[in-house]
Image: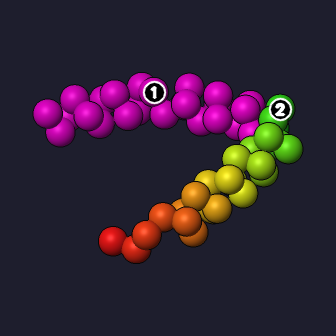
Amino acid sequence: MDSLAKLLMFYFAPWWLLMYNLKIYSNLPIMCKLHRIADQVRQNLPDP
């Protein structure tokens, strides 16, 4: 199971990083808004 997870990680990591970087660079204002929304949601959640 551990070797399979590593294999999948090595296989998908470059593609995931590429897609993630493309999304960040093409949607930077949207990403900033999402981060602000996520921060607000985190602040509104009750502490566990």
| Amino acid type indicated by mark 2 | Ser
Q: Nearer the viewer, mark 1 or mark 2?
A: 2
Residue at far left of view: 1
Left or right, 27 with reference to 42: right
The answer to which quarter of the image holds residue 8 is top left
Residue linked to disc 2: 26
The answer to which quarter of the image holds residue 5 is top left
The residue stretch that appears in magenta: 1-24
| Amino acid type indicated by mark 1 | Phe
Q: Position of residue 33 (x, y in %)?
A: 77, 49
* Residue drawn at 48 percent across, 34 percent down: 13
Residue linked to disc 1: 12
Q: Is 9 above or below relative to 32? A: above
Residue 46 image label? none
* Residue drawn at 40 percent across, 32 percent down: 10
* Residue drawn at 48 percent across, 64 percent down: 45
Left or right, 46 with reference to 32: left
In magenta segment, residue 13? yes
Q: 31 or 12, which is in the foreground?
A: 31
Q: Quadrant of the C terminus?
A: bottom left
Q: 19 or 40, which is in the foreground?
A: 40
Q: Position of residue 17 (x, y in %)?
A: 59, 36
Q: Quadrant of the N terminus?
A: top left
Q: Residues within 10 Å of mark 1 (few under 14, many from 20)?
A: few
Which numbered disc flags the more N-terminal residue, 1 or 2? Answer: 1
Left or right, 40 with reference to 8: right
Q: Position of residue 19 (x, y in %)?
A: 64, 28
* Residue drawn at 22 percent across, 29 percent down: 4
- Disc 2 is placed on an element classified as helix
Chief secondary structure of the magenta portion: helix
Q: Position of residue 22 (x, y in %)?
A: 74, 31
* Mark-to-mark CA distance, 1 and 2: 21 Å
